[in-house]
Structures are given as structure tokens and as C-alpha cells.
Amino acid sequence: MSTLPAPSALDASTQAFPVLTSAQVDRVRPVGKLRKVEPGEILFQPDDIGVPFFVLLSGRMEIVQPGISGERLIVKHGPGEFTGEIFMISGQRCLVSGRVVEAGEFIEVSGDGLRSLVARDAELSEIFMRAFILRRLALISQGFGNVVLMGSRHSANTLHLREFLTRNAHPYVYIDLDTDKASQELLDRFEVKMSEIPVLVCNGSTVLRNPTTQQLADCLGLNVSIDQSQVRDVIIVGAGPAGLAAAVYAASEGLDALMIEADSPGGQAGSSSKIENYLGFPTGISGQELSSRSIAQAQKFGAKMMIVHSVVRLGCTHRPYELVLDNDSVIAGRSIIISTGAQYNKPKIENLKKFEGQGIYYGATFIESQLCEDDEVIVVGGGNSAGQAAVYLAQTARKVHILVRSRALSETMSRYLIQRITENPGIELHCKTEIVALEGDTQLERVTWLDKKTGEPSTHDIRHVFIMDGASPRTEWLQGCVALDNKGFILTGRDLDDPTGIAPHAAWPLTRAPQMLETSLPAVFAVGDVRSGNVKRVASAVGEGAIAVHLVHRALADP
Ligand SMILES: Cc1cc2nc3c(=O)[nH]c(=O)nc-3n(C[C@H](O)[C@H](O)[C@H](O)COP(=O)(O)OP(=O)(O)OC[C@H]3O[C@@H](n4cnc5c(N)ncnc54)[C@H](O)[C@@H]3O)c2cc1C
């Protein structure tokens, strides 16, 4: 067997491409059918959907990826080995070709057959899931993707598309036009204008100029397996930690669950460089890793996910409830879990929008940290997300300035972060200080801040500002359907009884009382940061997502 090198995990090459024992193979047989194969037979190819899973009993096959410069061999499979990668469980399009090179007999298993097998056979589930995830990681690290992105650090959309591909764990090759002169010349010859950068080559054929994430998702077929006409048991709006947890529990408990996510999965936590207080990860875990593991887990149990589509309206006058999407399509659900979280507050500073992605960032992940290596940066905000960003960026930046409105960090930040900040010589704290001006041509070049203690403004040649300044609930799409508190967060359970609440309990239409986490609409639940009274932590979002599913079962049993 020759394999593409796997990532750093111990013994990853055998775990990515294990050989099943004959007893394990025997447990696959009942869900599949035997298929005789001949050399040259193509079993699947890029762009196929609904690709079956194969276990080789005899014979051999090779997995290759066709590319612009010819075919690349990824791996050869022999007896006892199996095909497959994350797309097997996500239902998305296949990235590779599978070709038989030696006649033999394979077990062919449909996607549904594989899902039912992993749901009841814990040992095989672990072997397959680990292999699929390691194979995807290897594809990502080797750039064995079906996407080539040619971009520039001076283009905000390049950053956006890179983040989108990374957060969707989609392998891609990045060509930096700022350093790769040959590629720049190629684009010049094809008269690609500055405004058309980044250029994206999708599936080796379609060329997209400065595409939206929606166009990219369509080109990659990331939403192809979603049947929009089906009335779902539960629709989960928002795929942050709360929504992902709800999807895992709903699907694992046999509910037909669909998640709808406006951007890429992971939510606010997905933009965290390291979450250190989530149970079970003593050395911390990046938001990106936590969300990609959760997506795989949800999809393993059969949850479906539609990305880059916002829900713009809730049809709440009759049941099943109807969710209207940004493309005007409508999806119906017998119950709804609202997990739309919160979005960053944007301080009122002139030119803020102009420099978004060109010096103004709302997340501090690996990609942003690369952009400001060895530069000075500013982090705005005094909460934990700002503290984490400052500590993370201090590893690569020349200097980090934290700007906070309050007198001291102790009013808003956890002690462990304050200690790391005060002990780090690369971080300087400026209390009672606010940005008052941003300047630059296309890229941010200078920042002026005002020290309110002295009343003195000062201007600095700083090209990167990270805004981590609190967040507001994303409830605008609910348009009066559910009761909100006076800050716009969703009221649930006993909070609906509050006589000072905007919608008192009297608005509740059933004889039974609303359940914990249930909104003023029966069978519509709110979880995570969007819920009034939630404590704004990953753990509480995850916990509420899990509890809501338990309550959905009860609400669905209502007469
Ligand atoms: C940088 C940073 C670091 C953090 N670090 C920590 C930490 O270390 N520990 C900790 O416990 N907490 C941390 N937090 C807080 C934690 O991330 C949040 O409490 C958690 O993400 C809330 O999860 P959620 O699922 O409720 O909402 P969110 O994470 O906000 O997710 C909501 C999702 O809903 C989607 N959405 C919104 N509106 C719509 C719509 N109309 N249609 C479809 N989709 C929609 C959004 O795109 C988003 O993906 C951090 C937050 C940030 C920003």
C-alpha cells in the first residue's frame, strides 16, 4: 500500500488506511452486496454524489485525483481495506476517482447502509470515522483538493474565502499572487482585473472571478444532498456550538434533523484560536477543530446541514412552521431550535467598513495571525475573547496593544487571562482608550486612538486591528414571532411568566406551560447565546442544545 503522508497523529498512516480483520469484514457483509470488479472499472469519480462505500475482499484498486497537470495517486487499496472519506457521511460530492487495477470481489455498501452500520457497531464506527477524518486532514495538508484559490493579502474576499474553506474543512491549494509572480503573469495574460481577484478554479474546470461564498458553495455542491421539500422533525437554525450539539443529539436520537447556517459552521467559537475552559480538553482546543469534529459527529448520525443560507423569516402562524431562506425557498419543520447566537458589535468608527478584511478583523485564527506576523496589532475589547486573541497574537506579532473602554480588565475578563496578559512583555494594555480614526489607501495603514485619561489623541503606524467588542443577539429574522427581552434576546420557559416581559405568559396558546428553553411559540426552542439569561460559554451552549432535543420529543408528542 502506498499512501499520501498523513498528518502528525501518532501512527496516523495505519489509522488512516487500516486493514480490517476477517471478523470485522463479516460484520460489514449484511449491510452490503457482493460485487465482482474488473481492471479499469471506475467505481466513483469527482463530483459524484451518493457514492457507495467499498470493502475489498480480493483484488486491488487505486484512488487518484485528476488535476490540471495530470492525475495524482493518493493511495492503493488491497484486501481488507476500505474506501471513503468525510464526503461518505456528509453526502457531499466526491473529490477523487476510484479505479480497479486488479480483478476481485468487493462488498458495496450504500450511504444509508454505512450510516446504519456505524450507528450500531461502535468498533467499526470508530475505525471508519477516524480513517475518514485522517484522510480528510491528509488531503487538506497535502493540498489534494478540487479548489485552487489564487488570491492576495490585499483582498478582503481572499481572506473570507480562505476562512470559509478552512471552516468547512475543504482541502484547497492557495497561490499567493503577492509572491508568485508566474501566476500573476498568467492572470495578466487572461486580463484578470484587480477587482476580479481572487480567482478560484473549482473542480479543475470552472473559473470563478472574485466569487461569493454562495457561488463557491454551489460550485462545490456543498448543499446538494438537501431535500428541501421534506418536512423535518426539527430544523436547527445556526450551526455554532449550540446548534451543532442539538444536531448531534437530535440525529443520534432518531429525529430527522436539518441545520441551516448563514455562513460556515462553528459560530463565534469557530473564530477562537483556543478554547481552554471546555470540559475534556485540558490543553485547549481551537474553535475550528471543535466545530469540524462536531460536524463529523452530527453527520455520522445522519443530520443534514445547509450552509451559506440565512433564514430571513419564520412563518409562525401555523404548523408545521415555515422557514424562509435568503433565496426565497421555504423549508418546513414540526419543531425549531433557534441557535443563531450573537454577532460582534461594530464600534462607530469612520472607515471601519472600508477596511474590513484589509486590516480590520473580527476573529483571530491562524489565517489572520499569518497576515500580521512580526507587525504591531491592536485588539479592541476587554472580554475573554479579546484576552484570548491578544495572548494568541502575541506569539507571532511584534507587539499587541489592547484597547479597553473600562478602567481595568478585572471588570470583564477571567483572571487566568489577565495574568497572562500582565506577564507578557509583548502585550501593552491601554485602559479608558478608544480608536477615533482609521486611515489608509486600500489597506489600513494608520490608527489614531484617544486616551480618555489624558484627553490626548495619538497616531500609530499600525495595520491590523482586531475588534472583539461584545456581541448582540441575531433575532432580527424572527419579526415578532417569539417574545424577546428588552435587549433582543429570546425569552424562554419561566422567563415568559415575568409580568414585566414583553410578551407575558398569557400569549402562550396551550394549556400546558412552556417547557424550559421553549419560546413563546410551542415547539420552538432557543439555545445558546441568543437566549435571554444564557451565560455565553461554549459549554452552556452545548448543554442547552442537548437539553432542547429532549424537550423537542415532548413537544412533538403534543396533541
Ligand atoms: C473569539 C471568541 C473566543 C471565545 N472563547 C470562548 C472560550 O474560550 N470559552 C467559552 O466558553 N466561550 C468562548 N467564547 C464564547 C462562545 O464562543 C459562545 O458562547 C458560543 O459560540 C455560543 O454558541 P451559539 O451556538 O449559541 O452561537 P454562535 O457561536 O454565535 O453561533 C450562531 C450561528 O448561527 C448562525 N446564524 C445567525 N443567524 C442566522 C440565520 N438567520 N440563519 C442561519 N444561521 C444563522 C451564525 O452564522 C453562527 O454560525 C468565545 C467567543 C469568541 C467570539
Image (cartoon, rainbow, N blue to C red):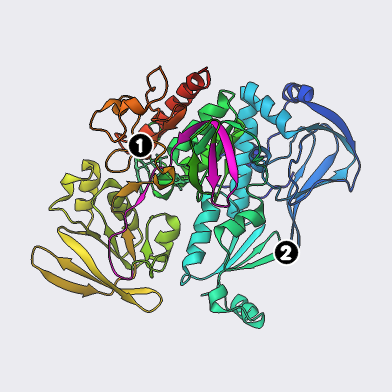
Kind of residue indicated by mark 2: Ser
**Residue position for label 1:** 490
- Quadrant of the image where one finds ligand 1: top left
- Quarter of the image with the N terminus is top right
Res 146 visible = yes
Secondary element at image label 2: loop
Kind of residue indicated by mark 1: Ile
Q: Does 123 sit above or below residue 434? A: above
Give, as a single range, the part of the protein colored magenta.
322-351
Expressed as whole percent of the image width and height from the top left, the position of residue 480 reads: 39, 41
Res 20 visible = no
Q: Does 489 sit above or below residue 202? A: above
Please rate how many residues cluster around mark 2, counting C-alpha atoms within 10 Å: few if below 14, some from 14 to 19, many from 20: few
Marks counted in the figure total 2
**Residue position for label 2:** 205
Name which of mark 2 and mark 1 comes first in the sequence: 2
- Give the residue drawn at x 49%, y 24%: 552
Q: Is residue 326 magenta?
A: yes
> In the image, is the residue at mark 1 within 8 Å of ligand 1 by its beta carbon?
no
